[in-house]
Image (cartoon, rainbow, N blue to C red):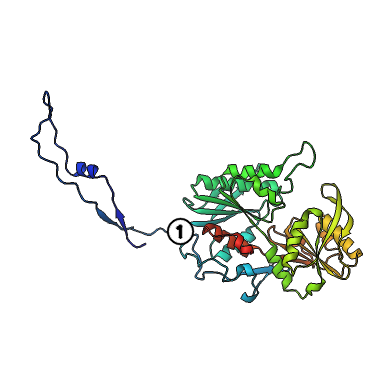
Amino acid sequence: MAPSLLHLSAATSSASSMAYPIPHRPRSSSTFQSNLNPLPPPLPLLAVRCNLAEPLRFDNGKPSSSSIPVVVTRRSGGVGEQEDPSSFPTFLSLQNTIPPRKHHDTRLRIFSGTANPALSQEIACYMGLELGKIKIKRFADGEIYVQLQESVRGCDVFLVQPTCPPANENLMELLIMIDACRRASAKNITAVIPYFGYARADRKTQGRESIAAKLVANLITEAGANRVLACDLHSGQSMGYFDIPVDHVYGQPVILDYLASKTICSDDLVVVSPDVGGVARARAFAKKLSDAPLAIVDKRRHGHNVAEVMNLIGDVKGKVAVMVDDMIDTAGTIAKGAALLHQEGAREVYACSTHAVFSPPAIERLSSGLFQEVIITNTIPVSEKNYFPQLTVLSVANLLGETIWRVHDDCSVSSIFQ
């Protein structure tokens, strides 16, 4: 660090009294003595050069030599391949990105929980940083222990932890990580939640039900988080449950970029919403996919994780149907919708979803031959035993990494999706 000039702005009276002590004024019976020598003039402001004996050193948080690393997209079971820069999504084009990063920005820290360490590592690689050192273990009785292995005092900390299955374990781990950072005097704590569990419990559909999404939002806020960065929330109103700022990013650009690389005629495309509640999401997706027509599957749900398809609104005969949803849990809704689309004459059916929860028997339903391809992202880790030939996994690491940079640099996040 270059020497810096430090100006001392002490009050004139204070400086004078320290340099020249005021002589004692003996008090007479009536008045003060007036034959004392006058005080010397006040001292001028001093300019002192301060040299650091040794510059501050941090092992974590040193960006790489390149200002914007190469984006790596994982496809077809997580196999990485380097993309041609000309094929990058528009939201990552060089003219839209923020200025080059500071090469010694040591105030940014990224820590990973145990829910999805692979995604956290990809985010850190995209940003040219190293993951922060953290110790997470579980005691014999199931309690979670978290200790940061490096200083975060005054730092901008980002904690990457989706609350995917097991939801309660991962949620509690996130809360303890936030508390550890708060007690370590972190300046700002951002909870990066690629998949927000309990998001479906966002309203009361029957009497005497809980609204767990609001409860989880309160827990994250009270734990000490200053901001939340979430990806494809189940419903937009979930952002209002937080009393802290929420940056909501969408996985659509990643999926749209992949679909654009496939040789599908735009006139043959039709975007399908698997239920009435996802119409807005499907409409926005269709608008960006060459303004494709829209179809809606009408279903009636008789219980949790049980769906029954009733009717189809729209024409899919001879077309390539692209079903869009925010998550695939047991795959009951999307599988029955695909069967209906085939009955109505659809030539091919693609399933696109951001969050792959994949609760049993999702794999059996998705690999039964109803789908030409099942396209998901890695917001939730997919174990190798759940891979099947039609599955394609895309990475959102570049999207989340760019968002983290913009939050850290106080830049616009919404401009990514424009």
Image height of 222 relative to 255, above or below: above
Query: Which one is nearer the viewer's eye here, 90 or 135?
Result: 90
Query: Which one is nearer the viewer's eye here, 105 or 27?
Result: 27
- Residue furthest out toward the right: 343
Q: Is residue 208 left or right of residue 315?
A: left
In the picture, the quarter occupied by the N terminus is: bottom left
Q: Residue 21's spot in the image, x, y percent? A: 17, 40
* Residue at which label 1 appears: 58
Q: Residue 349's spot in the image, x, y percent? A: 83, 66
User: How many discs mark residues in the rendered view?
Assistant: 1
Image height of 47 relative to 31, above or below: below
Q: Is residue 165 left or right of residue 346?
A: left
- Residue furthest out toward the left: 35
Q: Residue 334's spot in the image, x, y percent? A: 82, 58
Query: Can you see residue 104?
Result: yes
Mark 1 neighbour density, 10 Å: few (under 14) some (14–19) many (20 or more): few
**Residue at the image position 77 percent from the left and 56 percent from the top:** 278
Q: Quadrant of residue 31?
A: top left
**Residue at the image position 32 percent from the left and 61 percent from the top:** 3
Local secondary structure at mark 1: loop
Q: Is residue 342 left or right of residue 121?
A: right
- Identify the amino acid type marked 1: Phe
Q: Quadrant of residue 68?
A: bottom right
Q: Quadrant of residue 367?
A: bottom right
**Residue at the image position 57 percent from the left and 47 percent from the top:** 225
In the picture, the quarter occupied by the C terminus is: bottom right
Q: Residue 117's spot in the image, x, y percent? A: 63, 58
Image height of 345 relative to 274, above or below: below
Query: Can you see residue 364?
Result: no
